Image (spheres, rainbow, N blue to C red):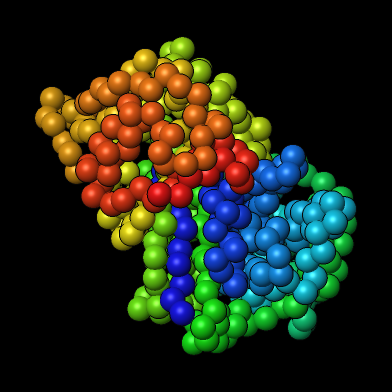
Amino acid sequence: MKVDVLLGLQWGDEGKGKVVDVLTPHYDLVARFQGGPNAGHTLEFEGEKYVLRSIPSGIFQGNKINVIGNGVVLDPALFKAEVEALEKSGHILTDRLKISKKAHLILPTHRLIDQAGEEAKGSGKIGTTGKGIGPTYTDKIGRYGVRVGDILHDFKAKYQAAIDRHKTMLAQYNFEYDLASLEKDWFEGIECLKRFELIDSEHLINKTIQSSKKILAEGAQGTMLDIDFGSYPFVTSSNTICAGACTGLGVAPRYIGKVYGIFKAYCTRVGGGPFPTELHDEIGDLMRKRGNEFGSVTGRPRRCGWIDLVALKYAVMINGVTQLIMMKSDVLDTLTTIKACVAYKIDGKIVKEFPFSIEGNLEPVYTELPGWQKDMSGIRSESELPDAFRTYLNFLEKTLQVPIKIVSVGPDRMQTIMR
Ligand code: GDP
Ligand code: IMO
Ligand code: MG
């Protein structure tokens, strides 16, 4: 059967982890196709909370196969920590988690180059997660990368050649570091990786497509962080969009099925870069507080603002979204008025189509809608939704021209309304 794809439509942290977990019972295989431990996907159920970084969010629902695809970049040290934390809480992964031999390894020096590069950029820094994502993808494209499959063949020579190159780069940054201590954890991570089945995952994925089984591809980050279509250069280094699932798993475009586009009822961003609807007032603070908007990986406070329908429409277009999922609706429960950005005013001109750049003299144009002022966190069915909230949903559906099929009203698996 076809591969369904679930993607973030904003600047990441939309709630992908929660919804992948909720949808997993309908699938046989869940796969990550890009990004790496820059992701932090949070799941909550039965009073427990988990944050996943490289392991797919389908790992908690029965015996489903989970795959880390070729498009992912993997840090063995962080992977080991993630595996051990899950095993400690009773989730044994060995037979259920498979890793592509073609996924690229984040070397300890990639992390150092990421950090040194950011330091050197000064006030122009991107605000990366410091996990070595950019340098690892740079080496992949530059054809210097070391892949998971390499740990099985002539590994030490490949590793050393890469490290020697990176040391020359780090010397230019004048960056101080202690490689030996990083390497200890890293090589222990390599041993942990060897406990898992390392496969040519494109074969497994395509055999599954040819069978009656169903695949869910789990995106990381969000469309506005996509290397091609995001707010460049304040983006991540991979294709976070639907097309990324094709290259990151080896799926032909004709085998893509549903495209779930996930967004928050408002908008957040972590790290640097333009954010037209950002709020620096008490409403922004309220969103941060009620939405617990602090990075799941870095703990950084997330910047908060109103929903941006110019950017969201663009994301729907680029991904070919077939159904929408709205998250964190409950965060806006207390507001009397909700604003939605429907256009930008750039140098005095109204612009409705997402432009080349959203930096500079840009002002959001808002439509105002009434707030619902009702606690929705306990609502479990569509019929209980307040009228003003329905008006907001209808307005978004009309603007985006795609149905909103799932509404989330809290972090727990159960706080999910199917429409
Ligand atoms: P992801 O990276 O897209 O998986 O999202 P994150 O896990 O980084 O951030 C989403 C945060 O919002 C997590 O702390 C979730 O537990 C939480 N969350 C998810 N859905 C909801 C919701 O509907 N309401 C509230 N209040 N929190 C939610
Ligand atoms: P999930 O999957 C939110 C942001 C960083 C920075 C930029 C580049 O949890 O939604 P990188 O380390 O990738 O080179 O950083 O991208 N970023 C994210 N923001 N959620 C994420 O992942 C992110 N992954 C990267 O903050 O601005
Ligand atoms: Mg996240």
On screen, residue 294 above or below 93: above
Q: Which of these two is toward me, 278 or 255?
A: 255
On screen, residue 97 above or below 83: below
Q: Give left or right: position of 61 versus 289.
A: right
Q: Give left or right: position of 164 versus 216.
A: right
At x 23%, y 25%, the residue is 367
Q: Is residue 128 visible?
A: no
The x, y position of residue 343, in whole percent, is 20, 33
At x 84%, y 51%, the residue is 89
The x, y position of residue 391, in whole percent, is 28, 32
Q: Quadrant of residue 36?
A: bottom right
The x, y position of residue 117, in whole percent, is 58, 44
**What residue occupies the far left of the structure in this picture?**
349
Q: Give left or right: position of 134 versus 196.
A: left
**What residue occupies the far top of the structure in this picture?**
282
Q: Quadrant of residue 207?
A: bottom right
At x 46%, y 12%, the residue is 282
Q: Give left or right: position of 276 versus 99.
A: left
At x 18%, y 28%, the residue is 345
Q: Is residue 330 visible?
A: yes
The x, y position of residue 376, in whole percent, is 49, 29
- Tally of numbered tags: 0
On screen, residue 141 above or below 343: below
Q: Quadrant of residue 61?
A: bottom right
Q: Which of these two is toward me, 203 or 75?
A: 203
Q: Which of these two is toward me, 83 or 88?
A: 88
Q: Which of these two is toward me, 132 or 28?
A: 28
